[in-house]
Structures are given as structure tokens and as C-alpha cells.
Image (cartoon, coloured by chain):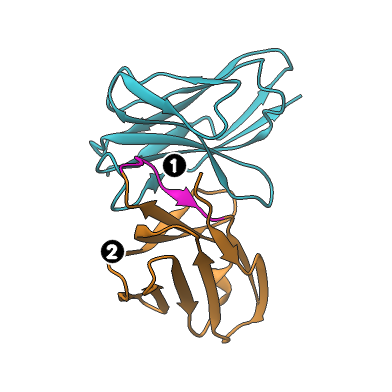
Amino acid sequence: GQQLNQSPQSMFIQEGEDVSMNCTSSSIFNTWLWYKQDPGEGPVLLIALYKAGELTSNGRLTAQFGITRKDSFLNISASIPSDVGIYFCAGLPNTNAGKSTFGDGTTLTVKP
Amino acid sequence: DGGITQSPKYLFRKEGQNVTLSCEQNLNHDAMYWYRQDPGQGLRLIYYSQIVNDFQKGDIAEGYSVSREKKESFPLTVTSAQKNPTAFYLCASSTDREGTYGYTFGSGTRLTVV
């Protein structure tokens, strides 16, 4: 099946720093989604992207749908301790797959 | 408030026993999904259902079974055939059958085999 390569696998940063993570695939996706999972909880949708080149913000979070439609990026500006968690990318291919493909996640640790 | 509810939050099972995890949504969502998450790993799809009375195997369906008799409910049974069932199980739903607008996840059930 289709695979999403999400990187980095983990990040340890200082509070106030900016964060960048990305997701790449060998296949084209029509939709890119970014989720955050707090410890012991289910993931929560952060941002959804539907067009190549689209740039969408949600507070301090900004995500981009790559021009090639094979990648997506998530940036977090001025990180705070509550940004800690696992960030997942997910993609919907250009077929009626009926389900998203998820990346393996980026675990973010923020040091106060 | 609408949402998706998983119960119980923690579940302990003896080896060789079947156990059923509950997932209920009152969002009027068409599609529902079950994922398994192991420590430090991503989400692996077990089963999904796009419509009542129909469901499809995901990537790791062996040792699991589901039913979708009502739109609101999508229970998952972990059978004794599942060799390594200890994991965090997540149920999700989506507005449309493709999941175009993303998933709403439940809070998860942590299953431990003792």
C-alpha cells in the first residue's frame, strides 16, 4: 500500500523555538491532514489541505500542501510546553480508497 | 455535545479470552474506523466501515472482527487468535465515506493481556 515518510521521528526543542516537520510520499495525494495526539488521548485534527501549493494557518501552526502533491509540511512558531505530543500527517490519495494513510508521527518534546 | 465515545478506557484480558471494545458516535458520521497504536509507533488500520452493514479489512485485520449494524456503533472484538493484543486502540469516524474532512477520534481503549 501507499506509505508516508514522516520526519523527523522526534524533536527536542527549547520553549520559544520554531519547529518544522514534513511528510513525503512516492504517490500523489489529493488531501493532506495534520493531527496532534496528546499522551493517552486520540489524535485531534489541526489542519486540512486540499490544493497543491495551499498554505493554511491555525494559530501558531502553518501547514503547506506541496506543489508536487507528494509532500506536506507543518511549522509551529514560538513553541510552548503544551505543544508536546505526537504530530501525525495523513493523506488521501486520488482514488476512492475510503481511508487515510498515516505517517508514523513526529514526537515533540518542549523544554521550558 | 456530539462526539465519539470509546469504552472502557482501560481493559485487562486473560490470554485466550475474546474481548469487545465499544465505539459509539452521535455525530451522524457515515464512516467509522479502528486503529491500533503500539508504544512509540504510528496508527495501523484494523477495519473500517463506510456504510451500515458493510466493512472492509485494513492492514492488520487478522485476529479481529467487527460489526456495523447501526450507523452509530462500530464494536471491535479482539479474539484469542490475535497473538499480541496488548495495545492502545483508537476508534474514529468521518463525515463522508472518504474521510475528506478528516477524522474525529475517540479517547482510546488501552488493552492489556495478563
Q: Position of residue B49 (x, y in %)?
A: 36, 29
The residues colored magenta run A96-103
The residue indicated by pointer 2 is: A50
Q: Say which element carries label 1.
A: loop
Which class describes the residues within 10 Å of circle 1: few (<14), some (14-19), or many (20+)?
Answer: many
Residue A99 inside the magenta-drawn segment: yes
Dot 1: chain letter: B
At a point 34% along the width and 40% down the height, the residue shown is A98
Q: Is residue A31 above or below residue B73?
A: below
Q: Position of residue B78 (x, y in %)?
A: 58, 21
Report which colour depicts chain B.
cyan
- Where does the N terminus of chain B fall, quadrant-wise? top left
Q: Is residue A16 left or right of residue B34?
A: right
Is residue B99 shown to the viewer in this render?
A: yes
Q: Is residue A29 above or below residue B82?
A: below
The reply to the same-chain question for discs 1 and 2 is no
Dot 2: chain letter: A
- Rendered orange, the chain in question is A
At a point 54% along the width and 78% down the height, the residue shown is A20
Closer-to-camera residue (B59/A74): B59
Closer-to-camera residue (A24/A26): A26
| Residue type at tag 2 | Tyr
